[in-house]
Image: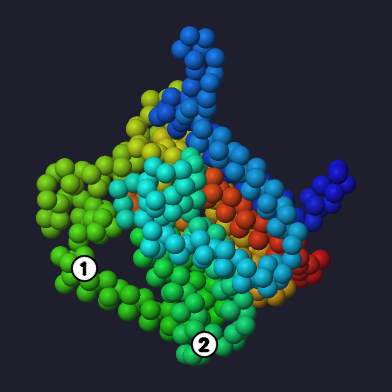
Amino acid sequence: MTKAIGNYMHRTDRLFWALCLGSSLFACVVLASIGMEQLGGFTTDELTGAVTGLGGYRKAMVQLGAMLAGAMLAVILSQIDYHSLVQIWPIHMAIAWGLVLPTLVLENWPNKNAPFVIGFSGGDTDNYSWYKIGGFTFQPTELAKISFILTFAMHLDHVRGRVNEPKELLKLLLHLLVPCAIIHIQGDDGTMLIFLAIGLCMLFAAGLSWKYILGALAVGTSAMAVAFGFFSDKIGKSYQWLRILAVYDPNNTSGWALNDEVLKSYTYQQSLGEISLGAGKIFGRGLFGGNYVYIPNAWNDFAFSWIGNAVGFVGCMLVLAVLLGIVAKAFMTGLRSEDMLGTFICTGIGGALLAQIIINIGMNVRVLPVVGVTLPFYSAGGSSMLMIYLSVGLVLSVYMHNKKTLFGNE
């Protein structure tokens, strides 16, 4: 056993493992800090004082368990040649999208309080993209994200050198936009944005011409301007639109909020998150026992704001540096791949992580609207953590099944 572990550690990317596991362990500490402050720490018996439940530490313990399970899956996946994983695309594609599609037509079925729910929505939104199994939730689009990276990498590898031919480019765009449309229908526009980022990063790595990139930006910007300028009254009833206005028109100069209560309801969490980040100052108020700024459900999308409150600007910069280090390692592993298939896979995973980091932190500093994008490794969620480590396993598979380095062959 010791020899097998030593052999694995010799072949794998030890720095990548250290960055990922370090982020996960610190995330568990952060979630324990939030749980103690907001959910009351351990549950104890009133008479004996004995610990009877995890209480507020449950999210941290679930995160730790998911990290350990995910790390084991990553070890297994890393030892499977990524070419084999691509070749079985019909299997993982059927499983992933077979789980996603029922959520398009079923909303909280059979009912929200049932032990097993399809199309579960935990909040007051139109996002019914979850499954609930007992006390746990699972978002199948996380699995679909990994399947999409593998199938899109295979597609790009197949049309290598012809990506700028209109016919081939149209097929690639259909491959990208159909999943995006499905996820939009689900009501999960945050995940849709991540899919778009993955596809665009992989297309760029495949050599997509700048004329297409600039043209798409021009068309997209023009379409948004037209929608905002002429159809805002028709689309303005959606909560997504109101969240956008809450960021870009916080003073209600256009009269989008009917009253002050509506305005506060859409700016409340972001306002507190912004205050929390600044209140931590340089070194923060400590992870436990500090005088914290309250952020509702800080363990989800606003974990970064809590980090700022607890460990300050210095802590935020260290967390961000490690996360960007993970992204950089994913891209560098793609560069050292002996074939473009490995490059495309690592580019997709690196692009997904980078997009999540940018959007989530943009939400926390109130320059982007809240769209339900979590911070990798840090936001609570067992299924999300498992899927992140499956992505880690894919990057390591590319690393371990190539002999090429950035500076030549080993």
Q: Label 1 sits on what residue type?
A: Phe
What percent of the width, then of the height, locates residue 102?
44, 62
What percent of the width, then of the height, locates residue 260?
14, 44
User: Residue 228 got which mark?
Assistant: 1
Residue 364 versus residue 150: which sits nearer the camera?
Answer: 150
- Residue 345 figure quarter: bottom right
The residue positioned 86% from the left and 44% from the top of the image is: 1
The residue positioned 34% from the left and 37% from the top of the image is: 296
Q: Under tag 2, what secondary structure?
A: helix
The residue positioned 49% from the left and 77% from the top of the image is: 175
Question: What whole-number distance in Å separates the C-alpha atoms at marks 1 and 2?
Answer: 32 Å
Q: Is residue 230 above or below residue 356?
A: below
Q: Is residue 370 above or below residue 409?
A: above
> What is the residue that sits farthest to the front in this orientation?
110
Q: Label 2 sits on what residue type?
A: Glu
Left or right, 196 with reference to 202: left
